[in-house]
Image (spheres, helix red, strand yellow):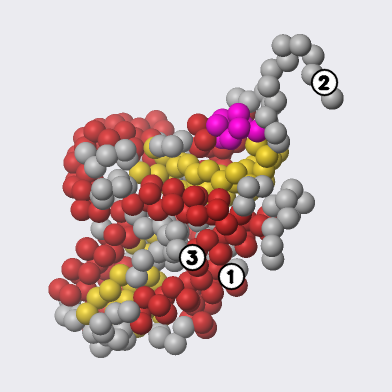
Amino acid sequence: MTLPPNHPAIPTPKVGVLLINLGTPDAPDAGSVRRYLGEFLSDRRVVELPPILWQPILRGIILTTRPRKSAHAYQQVWTDQGSPLAFHTRDTALALAAAMGPGVTVDWAMRYGNPSIASRLSAMKKAGCDRILLAPLYPQYSGATTATANDAAFAALKAMRWQPAIRTLPPYHDDPAYIAALKTTIDAHVAALDFAPDAILASFHGMPERTLHLGDPYHCQSVKTVRLLREALTLPVHMSFQSRFGRAKWLEPETEATLAGLVRDGVRNIAVVTPGFSADCLETLEEIALRAKEAFLSAGGEKFAYLPCLNASSDAITLYQRLIGRELSGWIDQPA
């Protein structure tokens, strides 16, 4: 078909996949952290208090005092490549693109910070992606993670006159391929340790307890992940929740308290995994690998190991290729 004169160029239609993770400041300094926290903690999915009550608190004491402390924490885990969450997510997108082949365009974005979801969706649309799968990399669904990532994407789409067709990746907390990937990586990391753990602790990001009572499935899906891990692994698997914030009652049991309790019960050597995180970040590398380790050893534990997330490992790419290939069915065929 011949286009009329002066017709704008039309890119070849493509199928796109946008990997989405939570977010990170641009640098480990107080100013960058303040901007990041201001965006993150202003999300009504994250903090469900009425803005008229919450914003004065956020703009007052929290954004005045917390950025300096959080910047110090980020400095403990920052690398030559920058933020661990950012470069692990980037590397995952690059490896997945190679695995999926030329028929699928794979990009990545952060819900908070850069690169933004809106900017990457716009770039994918300009590149010809007329069908896009949104893939928030959260195994367990929560309104504060999966839903808000989709919210941001839908808000960006709202500004587009010509929208691409959209699908979203469902939670995969109990998918056999996910449990198999966890088992394979946990077994490999444990085998490489210079000690034999007495048990595994699976630590998940915490949520206010009220979210469970309001119908958020995160707690139940996390519990199911642990149940399936217990069936898959030979070592005992315990469960806890980390990253509390504010005065509200949060999901129990808390991670550092659980570690102290395990020491009292005779566990001297522990390996900790974080099955709610797809990539290592501040919450895994500083909160668990550093602070939780210190708490365990101070309580009388002897050996502590943090086992890395799936990150951009070959097991992760195999898992994502299977999950995403399934969701792209009808748009493009992927090898089984």
Q: Which mark is residue 314?
A: 3
Position of residue 288 measured from the top left corner of the image (x, y, whole percent): 28, 64
Q: Residue at x 60, y 29 (%)?
A: 126
Q: Which mark is residue 177?
A: 1
Task: Tell me how far mark 2 sits from mark 3, CA to CA.
Answer: 45 Å
Q: Which mark is residue 249?
A: none
- Answer whether labels 1 and 3 touch (C-beta < 8 Å): no
Q: Is residue 335 left or right of residue 139?
A: right
Q: The magenta stretch spans which residues?
A: 121-128
Q: Residue at x 25, y 53 (%)?
A: 77
Position of residue 218 measured from the top left corner of the image (x, y, whole percent): 51, 60
Q: Residues within 10 Å of mark 3 (few under 14, many from 20)?
A: some
* Main secondary-structure element of the magenta-colored stretch: helix
Position of residue 272 measured from the top left corner of the image (x, y, whole percent): 33, 72
Residue for badge 2:
2
Q: Is residue 218 above or below residue 18?
A: below
